[in-house]
Amino acid sequence: MEITSLLSLPEGIGVTSSTLEEQTMNIRMCLEHPSACCPLCGDPSETVHSQYQRHLRDFPCGGQILRIHITVRKFFCLNSLCHRKIFAERLAPLAEPWAQMTLRLVATLQAIGLATGGRLGKRVTDRLGVETSRTTILRCIMALPTKSVGKVTQIGIDDFSFRRGKKFGTLIIDLQTHEVLDVLPDRTAETSASWMAEHPEVEIISRDRGGDYAAAARTSAPQATQIADRFHLLKNLGTVLEGMLARHLAAHRNAQAEKYVRTPLEDASSRQPPKQDPKEAHQSQAKREERLAKYKQVVALRKLGLSQTTIANQIGISHATISRWLIDGAFPEQKPRPRKSYLDSYLPFLYERWARRLPQYYPTTSGTCGPWVQKIVEVGL
């Protein structure tokens, strides 16, 4: 009776013995009711078929690991119309059928898991002396019943993977509260359409570019406005911009290449950079004004006595750049970078070879190159 009161056992369960082995308390129990009711038809029966042992884990008691070994009987169902001929007596409210943990231990793991999560919950249970794993804590959380979905006007729907590349499901989110409304077992149009048919109050559906969700919305929620979600909207924008910039870049490179057609080959030291177009000049001027504003801000903050590290963190530029600006004492203008080519170092040799071989293939009466050949050499073609 003392152990029964200590463990708060339900009525009808008695303790037969208890032993302590290496900080583990083993308690043996049995059910004292002479009969049990069939879980299918509900008729009572006293005809025992057999018995077996169930082993349950319970919450630790007094710093000792608690294990319950309970003898469970099997009965014959005396109802001839019942499809279940043999059934086992139930242990409610101690444990669920086929469970290996008591209901109070499951409730404790659910509370710990909701407060901390899987990995952190495992650390807490280790301190409490509960033998479990993070996956068990997560399974206990998943076993909790979901609250009923009320009226929702804006939803977001997208698929996710239960098992990568194998099994997929559908996640439905409330766009106003950002809470998960439901998790569907697959991503087919029929399953999504049946869920939407149950919620005719939906006004906005945010979805991806897949055709299944679009078909489900057209079929079961024609009153709703379909919009693209943020991820796919930005992805579509990025794809369009990437194609547009690629075309402009190609045109720009072609235009730059045409500037060098039929121009003399010059030495690398005397080559002048091409002139900028108005748009590039405007961008360069904007960048210079931005650097000048940052320079003035650095000088002003330095006069106030702020350190270079503080100025770097506040403005967002490197410590080395601030040191260089303060040491120079003037705004550093950026010099245009000289454009180099892999051909620059070989130009003198090419000039020499070209000048030597042209008279051989195009001789004149005087033994020198003609004027048009000289023009080719000058032009560099």
Image (spheres, grey):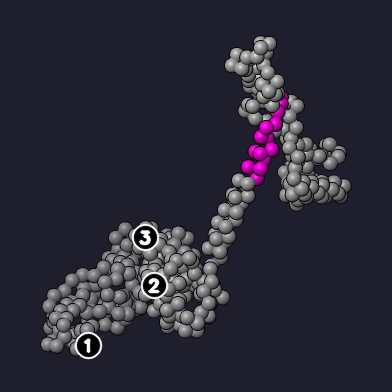
Q: Secondary structure at mark 3?
A: strand
Amino acid type of disc 1?
Gly
297 or 218: nearer the viewer = 218
Q: How many marks?
A: 3
Q: CA distance from mark 2 to mark 1?
A: 40 Å
363 or 36: nearer the viewer = 363
Q: Residue at x 18, y 71 (%)?
A: 52
Q: Earlier in the sequence, mark 2 or mark 1?
A: 1
Q: Which residues are magenta?
A: 252-267
- Image check: 287 left or right of 233? right
Task: Say whether marks 2 and 1 touch (CB < 8 Å).
Answer: no
Residue 25: name its quadrant: bottom left
Q: CA distance from mark 3 to mark 1?
A: 40 Å
Residue 120 visible in the snapshot: yes
Where is mark 2, residue-wise?
189
- Image check: 290 left or right of 213? right
Residue 137 percent location from the top left of the image: 40, 65
Q: Secondary structure at mark 2?
A: helix
Amino acid type of disc 2?
Ala
Where is mark 1, residue-wise?
42
Residue 261 percent location from the top left of the image: 66, 34
Q: Residue at x 76, y 48 (%)?
A: 278
329 or 17: nearer the viewer = 329
Dot 3: within a 10 Å radius of its alpha carbon, few (fewer than 14), some, or many (20 or more) residues?
A: few
Q: Earlier in the sequence, mark 3 or mark 1?
A: 1
Residue 309 visible in the snapshot: no
